[in-house]
Structures are given as structure tokens and as C-alpha cells.
Image: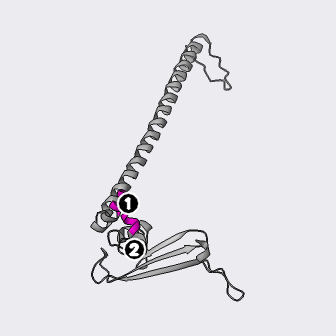
């Protein structure tokens, strides 16, 4: 995508970004927003990062996609078909035809949301598996440490009962008591 950013000439330096804006009149409320005019903007930087704006307010690409879903305007739009697409649609697999009809019927938004929810649930399941693995490892380590502590305490008790306490007093008045 970097090739859409102006590379410069002898007289003009190269730009650091490219910007495109699409303004749509929304008087008939086709888009589910309260604005009469909707401007969608994308800025592409040389670093590869993108920034999306909706009426000059920063937003996510997902917000823009949700805005246009079920409107007939979008990457998989059904309202504008290029030459040869009708024949391809008629000869397409039933799943492909179903996709077009679902978008035309206005249920695409719900399908997209359902698929996103499934992806998040799958990710949550994977996270739970990782947490269970970590928990099992920690429990194994705790058990090992408890056995180590118990062994150390037993050795310490035995050594205290057999070892006399020696005391070296520096002051004349210091006394030393035997611990046993």
C-alpha cells in the first residue's frame, strides 16, 4: 500500500502519509447514524499504520464495516455488480448465493456478529486451557515445595535437640541460655 503515498519529485519532498475521504449524504437515513452527511476517512502512513476517522473522529475499521453492513455498500456489496458477476453468481455454489441473499435481506450484520462472538469464545477457551496448564504446574511446584519445607523442618528440629548452644558474650553482664 505504500505505493499510494506520494514519493516526491525533484522539487517536492515525499509525503509521510496518504489520505482519502468519502462523503455520503445520509438524508434518507440509510446509514444508522444521526448525521445528514457522513465522511469516512482513512490515513495510511509510510510505517504501514492506518488511522480511520468517521466525521473527523477517530474510530476502528470494525466500526466503519458495521456502519456499512446491510446497506448494499461494502466490500461484498450486492447493489453494484460488475459485468460477468451475475452469471458467476448464478453458477456459484449455494453457499456463495446464500451470502449475497443474506446481505440483501439484512441479516449479514447478525451473521458477522455471531462469527465474531464465536471467535472470541474460541479464544477464551484457549485462554482457559492455558490457565489450567499454568495452575496445574503451580500446584505441582507447591507440592514439591511443601515436601521440601517439611523435610527441612524435620532436619532443623533434630539438629536443635542434639546440638548444644554456644554463647560468646562480649559484655560482662551478658548471659546465655540453652535452647534445648
Q: Main secondary structure of the magenta part?
A: helix
Residue 96 disc label: 1
Q: In the picture, which quadrant includes the C terminus? A: top right
**In this rendering, does residue 37 appear at all?**
yes
Name the residue furthest top. Answer: 162
Q: How is the image coloured?
A: one colour
Question: In screen coordinates, is 95 left or right of 130?
Answer: left
Q: Secondary structure at mark 1?
A: helix
Q: Earlier in the sequence, mark 1 or mark 2?
A: 2
Q: Secondary structure at mark 2?
A: loop
Residues in magenta, as a range = 87-99
**In this rendering, does residue 63 appear at all?**
no
**Could you tell me if the residues under marks 1 and 2 are in contact, i.e. CB atoms within 8 Å?**
no
Question: Residue at left 44%, top 75%?
Answer: 53
Label 1 and label 2: CA atoms lie apart by 14 Å
Name the residue furthest bottom. Answer: 11
Residue 144 position, x and y percent, is: 53, 25
Question: In screen coordinates, is 98 left or right of 123?
Answer: left
Residue 18 position, x and y percent, is: 56, 78
Specify few, some or many for label 2: CA neighbours under 10 Å numbering under 14, 14-19, or 20 or more: few
Residue 78, image quadrant: bottom left
Residue 81 disc label: 2
Amino acid at each position: 500500500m505504500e505505493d499510494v503515498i506520494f514519493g516526491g519529485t525533484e522539487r517536492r519532498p515525499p509525503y509521510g502519509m496518504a489520505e482519502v475521504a468519502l462523503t455520503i449524504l445520509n438524508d434518507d437515513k440509510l446509514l444508522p447514524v444521526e448525521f445528514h452527511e457522513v465522511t469516512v476517512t482513512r490515513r495510511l502512513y509510510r510505517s504501514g499504520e492506518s488511522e480511520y476517522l468517521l466525521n473527523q473522529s477517530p474510530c476502528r475499521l470494525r466500526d466503519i464495516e458495521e456502519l456499512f453492513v446491510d446497506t448494499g455498500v461494502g466490500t461484498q456489496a450486492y447493489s453494484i455488480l460488475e459485468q460477468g458477476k451475475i452469471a458467476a453468481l448464478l453458477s456459484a455454489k449455494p453457499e456463495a448465493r446464500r451470502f449475497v441473499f443474506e446481505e440483501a435481506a439484512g441479516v449479514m450484520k447478525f451473521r458477522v456478529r455471531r462469527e465474531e462472538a464465536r471467535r472470541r469464545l474460541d479464544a477464551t477457551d484457549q485462554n482457559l486451557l492455558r490457565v489450567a496448564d499454568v495452575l496445574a504446574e503451580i500446584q505441582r511446584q507447591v507440592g514439591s515445595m511443601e515436601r521440601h519445607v517439611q523435610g527441612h523442618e524435620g532436619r532443623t528440629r533434630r539438629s536443635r535437640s542434639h546440638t548444644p548452644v554456644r554463647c560468646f558474650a562480649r559484655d560482662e553482664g551478658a548471659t546465655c541460655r540453652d535452647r534445648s
